[in-house]
Amino acid sequence: MGAHNLTGTTLLQNGVYSKGTAYSEEERAALHLKGLLPPVPATISMQVEAMMEQLRAFDTPFQKALFLDGLRSSNETLYFRLLLEHIEEVLPLVYTPTVGEVCQKFSHLFRFAKGLYLSIEDKGHVSEILENLPQEAVDMIVVTDGQRILGLGDLGINGMGIPVGKLALYTACAGVDPRRTLPVILDVGTNTERYLNDPLYLGHKHPRVSGQEYDDFIEEFFQSVYKKWPKCVVQFEDFGNNHAFDLLARYRSRYCCYNDDIQGTASIVVSGFFSAMRAKKSKLSNEKILFLGAGEAATGVAGLIADAMVEDGLSREDALARLYLFDSKGLVTTTRGDTLAAHKLPFAKDIPSVKDFEEAIRTLRPTAIVGLSAQSGAFTESIVKAMTEINERPIVFALSNPTSKAECTAEQAYTWSDGKVLFSCGSPFDPVTYKGKTYVPRQGNNSYVFPGIGLGAILAQCKEITQEVFLSAAHTCADMVTEDDLAHGSLYPSLTRVREISHLVAVNIIKLALATGQAQIEAPADIEKFVTDNMYTPDYE
Ligand SMILES: NC(=O)C1=CN([C@@H]2O[C@H](COP(=O)(O)OP(=O)(O)OC[C@H]3O[C@@H](n4cnc5c(N)ncnc54)[C@H](O)[C@@H]3O)[C@@H](O)[C@H]2O)C=CC1
Ligand SMILES: CC(=O)C(=O)O
Ligand SMILES: [Mg+2]
């Protein structure tokens, strides 16, 4: 998909290349567009203004998301320009929380084909199918099998909204060229009854396939993709934890890939802890952290916090001793009598288990609780108050998505803690005014870092994406938090700075990759400029 030679209606109907009303008189003459458009050429700024007026006229976020999907299909450049210029307003429409609702209804609202649908029934033919794609070159792939979409569970092929949304962020937030991105859904079936019984569901209606057949399908996917695009970066997204850890272990050193839920989340949550340490003038090595949830996200975060604590001077053993997990069966201990999954083992404690989360808080007296459990409302008033009794500045992160799954709301956290909490959330909450002070909660969401991590990995042509990359991105993002942010209770920079954040995350990753021998490029003379020059901006060519 390089330069095109489209003209007339064919050009106007091509959402990748069309400028809509923005063609000049000369272009209209040269491209056989005269008479096909209203007579006065618009600028892209006029187009953004008009589209924002339309967007704001819709009543619900869901309607707005559908409008944006239509806009994207008719004029991709304008869509990304609008996203970039109105990121705070529009991000919740293309990403969490609205993307959750879009996914749940995906089969019922499908209109515009985007990305790659591969079914396990296609096994043996993946390479052939890749040839049907319009992309000649692909730098960034986000792939899911739809098994754990946000905290909404198994959505089957309806999960396609997530790779599409995540890649929109790669472009808007980090300037990854949208024509070189590829969202992928692997249809291996679904175990969700309501989809199996839904006459309009567009995926294959059989229970999820797993085991050797599943593994072979994934292997074929990787081999086919890397044969065609040897330098691309693959992000695993929203796989179930019965596959996510194994797939990452299997592929992380073979290909340039990472798991956003395990590793990207870890990076942004550790970044939030760095900021919280500044706010409470303490050191990470003094923290005792209790996670609600012991899955991909929680154990990914716990693992990277252990690394950060080691960086802060603790031994690994002492670091692990400060990290506790609490899952659906209670406090994760070696004494529970069940067989613990490998990802939980490093954090399992040799103490009696507790079934009640509040009791765990009162017994362990943590400095921080981190919600990655998809259990809506799990951080009750009594829990937040208990944290506030124990700590002068309790850390409470309610990180589950979408908003309907958050462990508590921002307003609850600030009110119940009498304004003392250091809070962050997975999905956006509005600022909260409590006792005359306005707090601005920001999102402890991997979206702050994954776009820059992907961009850095693409540009450095990393052999693999090492654990240090995620710690580097955590530091980069935390270093951008201002004193003013902290004074408003914000542990992350403003989203309006996301291009700047992604740029710096990418620069630091390239430096790291060059220093550690992971890069497959010659060191650019000016790395900052190299990254700037390679960031796509949505302008008409
Ligand atoms: N803010 C962010 O950037 C991110 C947020 N998340 C959110 O975190 C949540 C979990 O995601 P994953 O870890 O990938 O899922 P997962 O399925 O791997 O883990 C879920 C964990 O929650 C535990 N759990 C379930 N019910 C529980 C209960 N009643 N009490 C205590 N624990 C319970 C399970 O035992 C499991 O350990 C989702 O809502 C997801 O949206 C995930 C990735 C990034
Ligand atoms: C943010 C994200 O990746 C999730 O909730 O799964
Ligand atoms: Mg995810």
Image: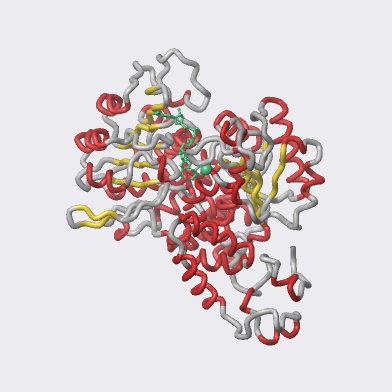
Q: Is residue 355 above or below residue 276?
A: above
Identity of the residue furthest to the left in this view: 435
Colouring = secondary structure
Residue 38 appears left or right of 283: right
> Can residue 312 be seen at all in this image of the molecule?
yes
Residue positioned 54% across, 64% down in the render: 528
Q: Is residue 463 above or below residue 79?
A: above
Query: How many numbered callouts?
Result: 0
Q: In the rendering, at what x and y percent does residue 300 appear? A: 48, 36
Residue 227 appears left or right of 263: right
Q: Quadrant of the C terminus?
A: bottom right
Q: In the rendering, at what x and y percent does residue 122 appear? A: 77, 38
Most foreground residue, 58 or 89: 58
Residue positioned 26% across, 24% down in the render: 363
Q: In the rendering, at what x and y percent does residue 16 appear? A: 67, 65
Residue positioned 39% across, 27% down in the render: 326
Residue positioned 64% across, 46% down in the render: 234
Residue 412 appears left or right of 314: left
> Can residue 286 be seen at all in this image of the molecule?
no
Most foreground residue, 202 or 438: 202
The answer to which image quadrant residue 282 occupies is top left
Most foreground residue, 88 or 533: 88
Q: In the rendering, at what x and y percent does residue 1 appear? A: 74, 63
Residue 247 appears left or right of 262: right
